[in-house]
């Protein structure tokens, strides 16, 4: 496992709990050591990591999308041997994954793309894995995927890039769901009934057609801060929502709700709305994403 941040570290612990031997590397030696203290085998650098693995190797890369992922894959390409597999578990753009898979294949290496959902709860609940790439490689590494995922939580989606494509759409849908919940709860927050929003979120988890894990997390967030006064309504986007809308434009598929939810995130950076505090609170609940606090008065 290369990259032991919020996701990579917990995924390593889940793999260790599943009986796997895991060699780990992180640029922060203290982070590597903290995971090694839980049973992993810490490597000094990528070269040392590759040397500690027996062929055919499997290296899971869990670093930020873009340049960090590209640099890590480039470095590994010079160290690995034909027959080895690299798994990109980050939120890379699917077209980048297609290109990278073709380049690595020229050296006899296989790239699998593992769209990974589960956030900070994945360690205990499991990670939903959407894996694209060579079918034989996926079969060989299936014990890894099934250890990380809950029951029925792993699927090979198709060829290289398809896992990241499905994860991109997954995150686009997430944008829309968060926006719908936020607007409804903001309307209730504005009414003179002085409604108990936490109680309503809890109620809707029992038999309601809008029940979901996100609603459960809404209940947790509202229990901690009933009016979300401790969170600024500044909502980040990590790229997948933009890519989803761009893909809709390319294919001519109307996505009004998803596109609107993306633009609402842009608007959140210009003003501090209650609905944006709601979305920021839920992103913190399910993914451990940082929230911005109000400036001291």
Image (cartoon, helix red, strand yellow):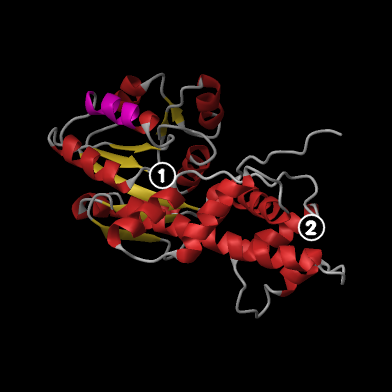
Q: In this image, 224 relative to 140: left or right?
A: right
Kindly state the secondary structure of the residue where label 1 is placed: loop
Residue 71 magenta-highlighted: yes
Query: Label 2 near label 1: C-beta < 8 Å?
Result: no
Foreground: 181 or 269?
Answer: 269
Residues in magenta? 70-78
- Classify 153 as above or below 84: below
Q: Which residue is mark 1?
A: 91
Badge 1: residue crowd in 10 Å (few <14, some 14–19, many ≥20): many
SS category of the residue bearing label 2: helix
Q: Which residue is mark 2?
A: 223
Vertical comparison of 220 with 290: above or below:
below
Task: List x then y, in percent, for residue 182.
Answer: 66, 61
Rendering coords of residue 65 (x, y %)? 40, 37
Magenta highlight on residue 37: no
Residue 167: % across, % down: 40, 54
């Amino acid at each position: 496992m290369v990259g032991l941040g919020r996701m990579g570290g917990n995924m390593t612990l889940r793999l260790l709990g599943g009986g796997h031997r895991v060699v780990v590397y992180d640029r922060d030696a203290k982070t590597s050591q903290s995971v090694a203290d839980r049973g992993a085998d810490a490597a000094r650098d990528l070269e040392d990591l590759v040397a500690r693995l027996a062929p055919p190797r499997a290296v899971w890369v869990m670093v930020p999308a873009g340049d960090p992922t590209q640099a890590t894959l480039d470095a590994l390409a010079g160290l690995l041997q034909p027959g080895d597999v690299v798994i990109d578990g980050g939120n890379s753009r699917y077209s980048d994954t297609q290109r990278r898979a073709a380049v690595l294949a020229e050296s006899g290496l296989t790239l699998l793309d593992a769209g990974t959902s589960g956030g900070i709860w994945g360690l205990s609940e499991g990670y939903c894995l959407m894996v694209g790439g060579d079918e034989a490689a996926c079969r060989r590494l299936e014990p890894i995927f099934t250890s990380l995922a809950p029951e029925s939580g792993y699927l090979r989606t198709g060829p290289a890039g398809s896992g990241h494509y499905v994860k991109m759409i997954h995150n686009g849908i997430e944008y829309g769901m968060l926006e719908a919940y936020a607007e409804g709860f903001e309307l209730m927050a504005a009414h003179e009934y002085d409604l108990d929003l936490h109680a309503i979120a809890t109620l809707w988890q029992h038999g309601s057609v809008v029940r979901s894990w996100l609603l459960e997390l809404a209940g947790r967030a509202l229990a901690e801060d009933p009016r979300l006064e401790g969170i600024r309504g500044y909502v980040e986007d990590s790229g997948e929502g933009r890519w989803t809308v761009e893909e809709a434009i390319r294919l001519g598929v109307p996505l009004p709700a998803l596109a609107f939810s993306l633009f609402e995130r842009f608007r959140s950076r210009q003003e501090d709305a209650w609905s944006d505090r709601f979305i920021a609170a839920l992103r913190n609940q399910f993914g451990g994403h940082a929230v911005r606090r109000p400036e001291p008065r």
